[in-house]
């Protein structure tokens, strides 16, 4: 406890906790929609795209890689949405094409042009894919960007809650009532891309899906209504993020893997509780 109190007094840990809470909250809110619509695989696809964009930013030498990662990821999210409506290229095939292609190109570029002459390319790639301690080294500008984008995501979910609910459960009926379902799907895709970019600093590009899927699945073990699942998923995600960051700081473990392990533990507890409740 003494060591934990010492860490909590450090500004870099406080910044990490703030960003981690905001990212976990945003990911959990949209994660419920993705799980219910069976679009959770999009998180993997966009995370690979974000990795490719991050590799390009590192090779070019951008001081703020978000200036490149966010536009590229948003563009690919829109392309995935359009491709998913194309009869010739199904949604899952489009995700596989874009995600694997971006992952391969990103790794190839980092090997051909090591960023800033760094010879430890494997270490950089491993940290980016699985998460390391990057969230503990956030710069003030990155923190403010994360706060601003998180506020936009939460505001979007609150303001368009009923539209998101309608599109999630019955898109055809929502369109029949006059709702512009294509526009709302586009907005959801853009917001998801933003959340993916924010979550890369927290858990790494390969573990982002866990941050999106596990809280929603855990909440669904006990609750059935959309609102109850969304609130419970948000609470679970924030709790696991805080727990993972604190344990990571004390035990010197990777932040992303520790957060995912906390989510797995909570999922097991909620599953057991759901079984006992059913009996």
Image: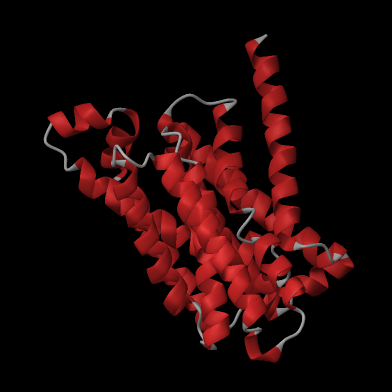
For the residue pair 32 and 60, the one nearer the viewer reads as 60
Q: Residue at x 36, y 42 (%)?
A: 89
Does residue 144 appear in this view?
yes
Please state the horizontal and vertical placement of residue 165, each as a whole percent of the image: 32, 36
Instruction: Determine whether 167 is above or below 209 in the image.
Output: above
Question: Residue 174 falls in which quadrant of the image?
Answer: top left
Q: Is residue 244 left or right of residue 161?
A: right
Q: Is residue 261 left or right of residue 174?
A: right
Q: Which quadrant holds residue 137?
A: bottom right
- In this view, the residue in front, 249 or 111, is 111
Q: Which residue is rendered at x = 39% and y = 59% of the image?
A: 76
Tell me residue 69's x, y (percent): 46, 71
Q: Determine the residue positioned at 71% across, 74% down.
A: 124
Query: Vertically, is 82 above or below 230?
Result: below
Asked if 59 appears above or below 34 in the picture, the reply is: below
Q: Where does the N terminus fall, quadrant-wise?
A: bottom right
Q: Position of residue 161 (x, y in %)?
A: 31, 43
Is residue 85 left or right of 123 when viewed as pictured?
Answer: left
Q: State the residue in front, 246 or 85.
A: 85
């Amino acid at each position: 406890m003494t060591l934990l109190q010492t860490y909590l007094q450090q500004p870099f840990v406080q910044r990490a906790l703030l960003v981690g809470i905001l990212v976990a909250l945003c990911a959990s809110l949209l994660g419920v929609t993705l799980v219910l619509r069976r679009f959770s695989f999009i998180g993997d696809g966009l995370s690979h795209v974000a990795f490719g964009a991050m590799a390009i930013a590192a090779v070019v030498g951008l001081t703020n890689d978000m200036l490149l990662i966010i536009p590229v990821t948003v563009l690919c999210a829109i392309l995935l949405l359009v491709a998913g409506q194309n009869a010739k290229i199904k949604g899952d095939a489009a995700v596989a094409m874009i995600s694997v292609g971006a992952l391969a190109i990103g790794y190839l570029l980092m090997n051909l042009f090591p960023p800033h002459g760094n010879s430890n390319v494997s270490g950089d790639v491993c940290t980016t894919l699985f998460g390391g301690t990057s969230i503990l080294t956030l710069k003030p500008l990155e923190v403010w960007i994360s706060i601003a984008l998180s506020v936009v995501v939460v505001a979007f979910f609150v303001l368009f809650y009923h539209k998101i609910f309608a599109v999630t459960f019955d898109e055809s009926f929502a369109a029949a009532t006059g709702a512009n379902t294509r526009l709302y799907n586009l907005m959801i895709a853009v917001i998801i891309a933003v959340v993916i970019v924010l979550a890369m600093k927290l858990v790494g590009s390969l573990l982002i899906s866990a941050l999106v899927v596990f809280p929603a699945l855990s909440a669904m073990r006990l609750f059935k209504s959309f609102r109850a699942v969304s609130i419970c998923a948000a609470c679970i995600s924030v709790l696991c993020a805080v727990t993972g960051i604190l344990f990571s700081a004390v035990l010197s473990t990777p932040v992303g893997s520790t957060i995912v392990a906390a989510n797995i533990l909570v999922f097991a507890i909620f599953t057991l509780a759901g079984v006992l409740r059913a009996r």
